[in-house]
Image (cartoon, rainbow, N blue to C red):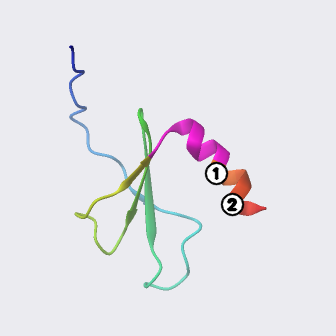
Amino acid sequence: MSVAPESTSRPQWFKSSYSGGNATECVEAAFTSAGVLIRDSKQPDAAHLTFSVRAWADFLPAESG
């Protein structure tokens, strides 16, 4: 079985526009070729969630409605 090499570039994280205005509710996102990464900005070295592009696209309209 062949395994593709991991990307050597690090994700470019940004604060989500859905985060609250204060420092206690910060969610960061990063777009990668594999999908969308989500993490807690207060714990950047902790685990993050990974969503496929399709799952993220399906989530956005459902979340705003």
Please check the rendered image and state whether residue 13 is part of the magenta-colored stretch, yes or no: no
Instruction: State the predominant SS element of the stretch in magenta.
Output: helix
Q: Amino acid at mark 2?
A: Glu
Q: In this image, 45 relative to 34: left or right? A: left
In this rendering, the answer to whether 49 lies above or below 35 is below
Image spot of residue 33 (x, y percent):
42, 32
Residue occupying image coordinates x 26% and y 44%: 10
Residue occupying image coordinates x 24% and y 21%: 4
In this rendering, the answer to whether 15 lies above or below 35 is below
Residue topped by disc 2: 63
Front residue (pair 55, 22): 55
Label 1 element class: helix
Image spot of residue 22 (x, y percent):
50, 86
Q: Quadrant of the C terminus?
A: bottom right
Hey, which quadrant is residue 49 in on the image?
A: bottom left
Q: In this image, 52 relative to 13: left or right? A: right
Image spot of residue 60 (x, y percent):
66, 53
Q: Which residues are magenta?
A: 51-58
Number of other residues with Cα within 10 Å of mark 2, as a class: few under 14, some 14 to 19, many 20 or more = few
Residue topped by disc 1: 59
Q: Amino acid at mark 1?
A: Phe
